[in-house]
Image (spheres, coloured by chain):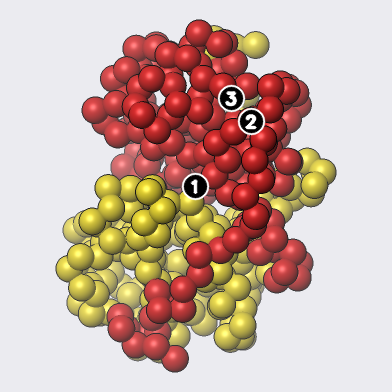
Chain colours: A yellow, B red
Amino acid sequence: MEPKAILDFICRRRSVRRYQKKAIPEEILEVLMKAAMAAPSGNNVQPWEFVIIRDPKTKEALSRVHPWVYMAAEAPAAIVVLGDKSSEWWEDDCAAATENLLLAAANLGLGAVWCGIKENQAAAVRKILGIPARLEVLCIVPIGYPAESPPPHTKYRKDKVHRDTYGQKF
Amino acid sequence: MEPKAILDFICRRRSVRRYQKKAIPEEILEVLMKAAMAAPSGNNVQPWEFVIIRDPKTKEALSRVHPWVYMAAEAPAAIVVLGDKSSEWWEDDCAAATENLLLAAANLGLGAVWCGIKENQAAAVRKILGIPARLEVLCIVPIGYPAESPPPHTKYRKDKVHRDTYGQKF
């Protein structure tokens, strides 16, 4: 593929926090899951699992686990990304899967936002969803057809790229 | 975009461990960096930095920091992903940036592999590259034009997708 088409695909992903009321079709949710599970994983353990939430009461409860996940209440769906902590690479693998999911969403015309969940917030999520102890909670991704359209962009900064050793530039 | 084109783009990324001797042009490396830095980041901190290594002696040294990064010696380049640990989200953000980099690479006709670096291996990488203490080492990505071509795939498993609560399926 041409570089421009590749960067268009990747830079189309932006954090979208406002959504239309339109539901996401089942087959589109399946595309998101196929994209997520195409991520690499340490020792090919594939430590990820996902909970897709459409029940309004459950979304409402999730939206209150911390101040920055309020969008989960209004979004037609929220996807919770879980990782099996028996793999030492679970967090990196699940983060890569989340990025795949977000890229697929953006290119399907959906909007979504990655809401990270720290350990002290995870207990509430566990309780709401009945998550077993072996699984960690990486994030909540509220998702829907966008009611706002931030333009594609990269945050590329040449000074963040070093050559051969740290601090050396070309 | 159509779901098939999106999944083709994402599923094209596979772990590639054998490379041709051909060098990667400078403008292609820049595309990889632009893709990486289009990742989302917690509080928009953009905690990532990158070291692109083409010096043979430095690649050779990196290839010995653990048994699974041997490919760095023969690859025409290796990219080390660093994260500023002053952001509590550095690891997730840098993992998302790495996934973007790998997706761009695959779609540019390059092959690469994510070699995770744990804290006990990071000291060696720090010493080789002169990395300041505020930065963590997420991974090393050996990269080049592929001498092997694993077919596109997803590891999608329907049983990893739950609905509304953990364990519930549609």
Characterize the local packing of mark 1: few (<14), some (14-19) or many (20 or more) Cα atoms within 10 angstroms.
many
Rendered location of residue A53, percent (x, y): 41, 81
Q: Nearer the viewer, mark 2 or mark 1?
A: 2
Q: Determine whether A9 is above or below B105 in the image.
A: below
Number of marks in the rendered image? 3
Q: Are marks 2 and 1 in contact (CB under 8 Å)?
A: no
The secondary structure type at the circle numbered 3 is: loop
Residues behind callouts 2 and 3 on a single chain: yes
Amino acid type assigned to the residue bearing label 1 in the image: Ala
Nearest the viewer among B164 and A121 is B164
Q: Are marks 2 and 3 in contact (CB under 8 Å)?
A: yes
Q: Which residue is denoted by mark 2 in the rendering?
A: B19
Q: Residues within 10 Å of mark 2 (few under 14, many from 20)?
A: many
How far, Cα to Cα, is label 1 from label 3? 23 Å
Q: Secondary structure at mark 2?
A: loop
Q: Secondary structure at mark 1?
A: helix
Front-most of residues B138 and A169 = B138
Tag of residue B75: 3
Is the same chain shared between marks 2 and 1? yes
